Image (spheres, grey):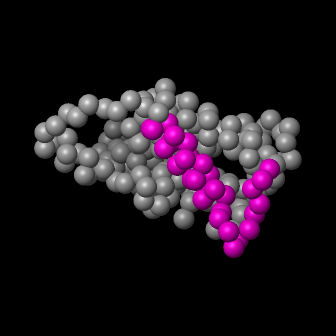
Amino acid sequence: MPPETRHSLIQRLQDGGDNAAWDEFASIYRPFIVRIALRKQLQVEDAEDLAQQVLLLVLKNISKWKADPARARFRTWLQTIVRNATINALSRRPRDQACGGTNAQQQLHQRPSPDDPLWFDREWQRETLRWAAQQVREEFEPATWTAFRDTAILELSAQEVAKRIGKSVGAVYIARSRVMQRIKQKIAELDGDSITQ
């Protein structure tokens, strides 16, 4: 399960006037919203515009959101805002011309449905991992980071990576483990004072 937004961050946003809280919130959620918009087939510029609209809606309405375990979590509330803004953006867009052919149909059927709630959770998890990795990257030597990235993300063999960076296979595994542990710690910090899961 991806972590929830920290309650303290939501509280700081609700109190208003905390630019640092807003910058932190935007740095976490803007890339996530853009990626969702891109998955809905919006152009990059339109996806950026959508992210801006969603962030403005959140800013305007965050004071109305209340933590209530019997009702929706913050993530569900945000998902509703993103979904509605995306539908509005798509409905204003001119209709595409049909491209025809079975290849196009096959590609459409292979894409996961963005309306599936599990799809939203997977995107949430990916964005949380991406954000945490970005936050800790500078803490590691380039070879350590490369060992992690090449084995954990690019899924290259430890032997291949060891040869490429001039380290032992054991050193590659240790480097990967160290980075993964730090990413988990960063995610736990984000989740530290979260609202109910």
| Residue 41 within the segment the image draws in magenta | no
Residue positioned 65% across, 63% down in the render:
73
Task: Tell me: 90 left or right of 139.
Answer: left
Residue 195 position within the rendered picture, expressed as x and y whole percent measured from the top left:
72, 64
Task: Tell me: 21 left or right of 58.
Answer: right
Quadrant containing the C terminus in the rendered view:
bottom right
Rendered position, 75 above or below 138: below
Task: Using the rendered view, name the quadrant where residue 54 is placed.
Answer: top right
Q: Nearer the viewer, residue 93 or 77?
A: 93
| Residue 79 within the segment the image draws in magenta | yes
Task: Using the rendered view, name the quadrant where residue 27 is placed.
Answer: top right
Task: Tell me: 82 left or right of 158.
Answer: right
Residue 130 position within the rendered picture, expressed as x and y whole percent measured from the top left:
52, 45
Task: Using the rendered view, name the quadrant where residue 99 is placed.
Answer: top left
Q: Nearer the viewer, residue 37 or 26?
A: 37
Residue 193 position within the rendered picture, expressed as x and y whole percent measured from the top left:
75, 61
Residue 11 position within the rendered picture, expressed as x and y whole percent measured from the top left:
81, 53
Residue positioned 15% across, 42% down in the render:
103
Residue positioned 13% across, 39% down in the render:
101
Residue positioned 55% across, 47% down in the render:
84
Image: magenta residue range: 63-91
